[in-house]
Amino acid sequence: MNDRVTTSAPAAAPAAATTRAGAGALDRIAPYAGWIAFALALVLLPLVFRSGTALTMMSLMGINIIFSLSYNMLLGQTGMLSFGHAVYFGLGAYFTVHAINAAIASGLPIPLFLMPLVGALGGLGFAMLFGWVSTKRSGTAFAMISLGLAELVGSSSLILRSFFGGEEGVSTNRTKLLHVLGWNFGPQIQVYYLIAIWCFICVVLMYALTRTPFGRMCNAVRDNPERVQFIGYNPQVVRYVPFSLSGLFAGIAGALSAVNFEFANAAIFSAVQSGNVLLATFIGGAGHFIGPILGAVLLTYLQNMLSDITDVWQLYFGLMFIAVVMYAPGGLAGLIMMHRTIWRAGVLWRLGPAYALMVVPVALVGGGMVLIIEMSPHLSVKEAEGSVMSMAGIHFDARSWQPWAPALVTLFVGAAWWRRGWRRVGGAWDSAQRIAREKGLLV
Amino acid sequence: MAELVLIATLNGVLFGLLLFLMASGLTLIFSMMGVLNFAHASFYMLGAFFGYQIARWAGFWPALILAPVLVGFVGALVERFGLRSAHKHGHVAELLFTFGLAFVIEELVQIVWGKAPVDFRVPTLLNFPAFTVFATNYPAYKLFMLAISIAIFVGLFAMLTLTRIGLIVQAALTHPHMVAHLGHNVPLVFMSVFGVGAALAGIAGVIAGPTLVTQSSMAGLLGPILFVVVVVGGLGSLQGALFASLLIGLLQTFAISVNLSLADIFGASGFNPQSGTVLSDLWRVTVAQTAPILPYALMVLVLIFKPTGLFGNRET
């Protein structure tokens, strides 16, 4: 993991630092083009996708973007693998729910917009407390400690019922707070914009942090803690600070989730929650700032879509995760960045034919696997429901050999074809890289 | 009181030895390969489910032998075709691979056996009370579990200290490169250790399956405790794993049987916090209710005062 690209810019800022002569107003804002596009997208998306489902999903995406980016402050920036990040997310949510309830009860004029700050403080406070114990160690031991702390908080939340509300949780009402500009946050669209604004603020802040000398020190601790010690820094402190800050941002994400659902219960601390953020961050790509954003958007979308279609969507997530770990450890962002150099060298088209030939085997292998995975439950758990099932409008009997034979044949033919096609991709890739190297774009 | 102490001690030692069956494999794999196998508890679960299935087809005794062998085989395959390719991307990638594997195994188990607990019964041969202490029957099956655990512990210890294979494994624990330089096939040693570790977890699964509940969430429930055992004992230390397993087994079993709260003990002091506050929750919580937290609290304490674990001497 040491050879990864250091925090490259998101499709945004300094990448566009091609300051041409004759700096007009356009050139002055050019470096910020990425950010302006991001802000515009956040504003305009609900005007394009108007349905209620889309709004709910986009709100969740905003929350998950903040959560995944905060997680990547640990995993990608500082090299700390945490299995318990949901702790700070959950505590942020609980503190916000209680703050909103307290503000309603006491009639204090605090607008809902400021409530995520409470979550931020809650997340920060507990990250400072738990970070003091866990950042003493790094690597594998840190990972296990984070898991243990998550279990500790999860189990405690069932004992301290007056604060955590036990299994039923604590609910609140976001509309009862002080209304500013006539916004009562009843309709989902208003909640979406609240989340979008906070999402933008958090993304800017977290990106800015990676550009500071401190952000660079974090990368140094990730890559070689020993040398960091030689130049007079204490790696333990350099781990502690981003850990606390990542708790702060996770707390904001949790607060927004509390505002979104008007509810928090003990399930928020579950291992599933901690696992999902790890999956999103890693599949998106931990080595690039934009990776977790891609991962959060993709996984939130898939989660919503797949859970409607199939019962075993988590299996697909797991398989996707293993595939990324084994074959593309840079994640989606890593794959994109690999192609960016080729594109800059102007030889991306050379990969076209090889990729086009891969479409068929990928479809065959994917189709065969999906068919087998979907048919299997009909032989075991869903036996009682009968063995007749339908996929893509075709009805068939999962008990008979007819659907299994084509599924297995497709899978094996696809796999054989894949091996041949992949060799061709490798050849095309090598020649494209050689050209990029000759042009001095690749070291 | 004597009855409570006796029964709780027996149960605690039993649970501790079960933990050790798994923790020993986990810590052996960790110290040799540097991989913390996140899916180790999943092998335990596979052992229980394979055992259940084979027991249904052929009875409990074949299951006791076949299921662990099968699990060990699965473990060796995982090492050979998964872990070894993940290895070239570093230790974090390996850890993440086993994390994804745990995820996938749980889903697959749910596809095959469903989410509800399966009916894995104690074999009729052992389904009788072994002895009665103060009106409490102690099941013979638990004694059998105890005997199996101790037998495997002794066998493992003898293999590690008395045989040539054990010597190579012990040497590879501390000096893996030197062992490779001496001409031993380290990848093969790794694959075997991973397989044997998985098989040990599989045995734990088969013998624990009938008394603890066999269901698809059992790996997720036990996994974190296993990690606590390894951290508390010290990463890569077998003695540490044994000590921590027994400690946590006894701690949890004794805690469950003590139904006292601070309010019961200091009730006479007249201090009585208003109900519905966090303080009152803490005041009225019984020791039994805190049992699930105790291992984790112990881990945090150990980390504060001895960050390498009780018997460990390795950083990371």
Image: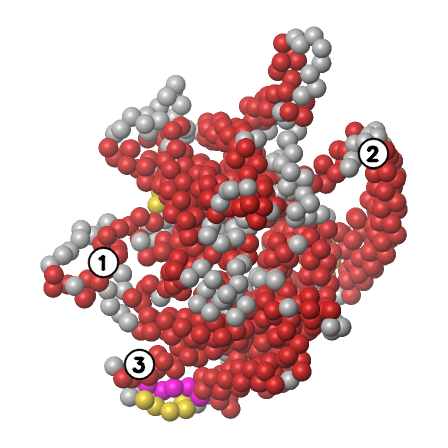
Which quadrant is home to the C terminus of chain B?
Answer: bottom right
Q: Where is residue B59 in the image (x, y as percent from the top left)?
A: 60, 85
Q: Can residue A239 be seen in this view?
A: no
Residue at 52%, 35% (x, y): give it.
A214
Bin the neighbour count of mark 3 within 10 Å (Cα to Cα): few under 14, some 14-19, many 20 and up. few
Chain letter for mark 3, please.
Answer: B
- Please tell me which residue is depicted at 63% across the width and 56% down the height of the picture: B91
Same chain for mark 2 and mark 3? The answer is no
Give the amino acid type for the residue marked by disc 1 in the picture. Trp
Write down the residue under mark 3.
B5
Height in image: B232 above or below A284?
below
Q: Does the magenta stretch include residue A34?
A: no
Numbered circle sitting on residue B283: 1
Disc 1 packing (10 Å; few <14; some 14–19; many ≥20): many
Task: Please provide percent x and percent y for residue B62.
Answer: 62, 85
Q: Give the range drawn in magenta.
A: B136-140
Q: Give the amino acid at mark 3.
A: Val
Looking at the rendered structure, whether the residues under marks 1 and 3 are on a common chain is answered as yes
Q: Do the residues labelled 2 and 3 touch (CB within 8 Å)?
A: no
Q: Mark 2 lies on which chain?
A: A
Disc 2 crowd rating (10 Å Cα; few below 14, some 14-19, many 20+) is: many
